[in-house]
Amino acid sequence: MRITVFGLDKRFDYAARALTDHGYQTVRYEEGGELSPILLLPLPASRDGVAVTGYSSVLLADLLAARPRAIVGGNLSGSFTSAARRAGIAVRDYMNVEAFVLKNASLTAEAALGILLSDSPAAPRENPTAILGFGRIGKFLCRGLLSLGCPVTVFARDPRERVMATLIGAKAFDTKTLAAPGALRGFRTLVNTVPARLLAHEATADLPTGSLVLELASGDGNLPLPLPGSGVIFRRESGLPGRVFPESAGIALGETVSDLIRELFPDGGGNQ
């Protein structure tokens, strides 16, 4: 079974190796090269809905016109998925596989924890940290920080998530409390995991000089930028698993893609 692998970061090199170990023939995409019956697209598959991420000359429409037997990608749009199915192309999104999403979230949290430890001037126990959101990444990161003795406060909308945060040793408040003046006073680190704006423009003014603001969610404008001269450090970190732990991220991806292909072609029909 032959697979053309897109994706420019090292994670996809390891994913290709993992797929090879599972018995697939993998080739990295080369301009002008023949496409395989199976295509593996990056994460996200496209940022603009037109071209494959990292390949401005490779249009999604051209991939559909090539009529591969299957396309596997990350965060595939509904319109692309529908168009592929109308063309008779099997489609799977690896970001819909819960096991893979959990592994990816765990790697993201571990990479973020490394950033916090290296960029924060204070030891964890002296570094009160606020985490916005308590989804997969928030949970893994909270647990890691607590294990180091870091005082953690979680801001979450769902009352069940707040209860869970308190049960593992964090403080927890409703995201509505972020609208109150001084909501971030007392924190030295702020981590956002929510792809939405929860803070007022002036909120980061409550953070002392040397504080770290870490943006982990996708999209721009989720967090207000620190005021000029405030001494607050702002870091936007996306795609952490692929950049920090490419081997672990790539193996997890390759194994997930292998499972999806076997699901699509249980009799090995994609080998044709």
Image (cartoon, rainbow, N blue to C red):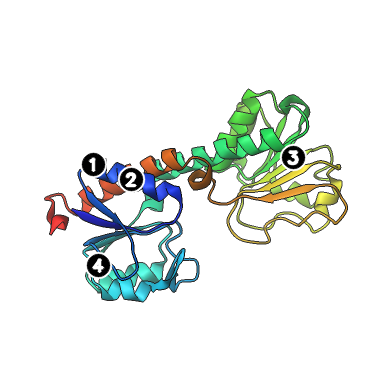
Which is nearer the N-term, disc 2 or disc 3? 3
**Badge 2 element:** helix
Please identify the quarter of the rendering in which residue 259 is found.
Answer: top left
Q: Nearer the viewer, mark 3 or mark 4?
A: 4
Judging depth in this view, the residue of 42 and 218 nearest the camera is 42
Please identify the quarter of the rendering in which residue 252 is found.
Answer: top left
Which is nearer the N-term, disc 1 or disc 4? 1
Q: Are marks 1 and 4 in contact (CB under 8 Å)?
A: no
Q: How much space separates mark 2 and mark 4, taking CA atoms?
A: 21 Å
Q: Residue tagged by mark 4?
A: 34
Which is nearer the N-term, disc 1 or disc 2? 1
Side (left or right) of 115 relative to 202: left
**Amino acid of disc 1:** His
Q: Residue tagged by mark 2?
A: 254
Q: Nearer the viewer, mark 2 or mark 4?
A: 4
- The percent position of residue 251, horizontal first and vertical second, equals 37, 40
Q: Nearer the viewer, mark 1 or mark 4?
A: 4
**Amino acid of disc 3:** Thr
**Amino acid of disc 4:** Glu
**Residue depicted at 72% across the width and 29% down the height:** 151
- The quadrant of the image that shows the C terminus is bottom left
Numbered badge on residue 22: 1
Q: How much space separates mark 2 and mark 3, taking CA atoms?
A: 34 Å
**Badge 3 element:** strand
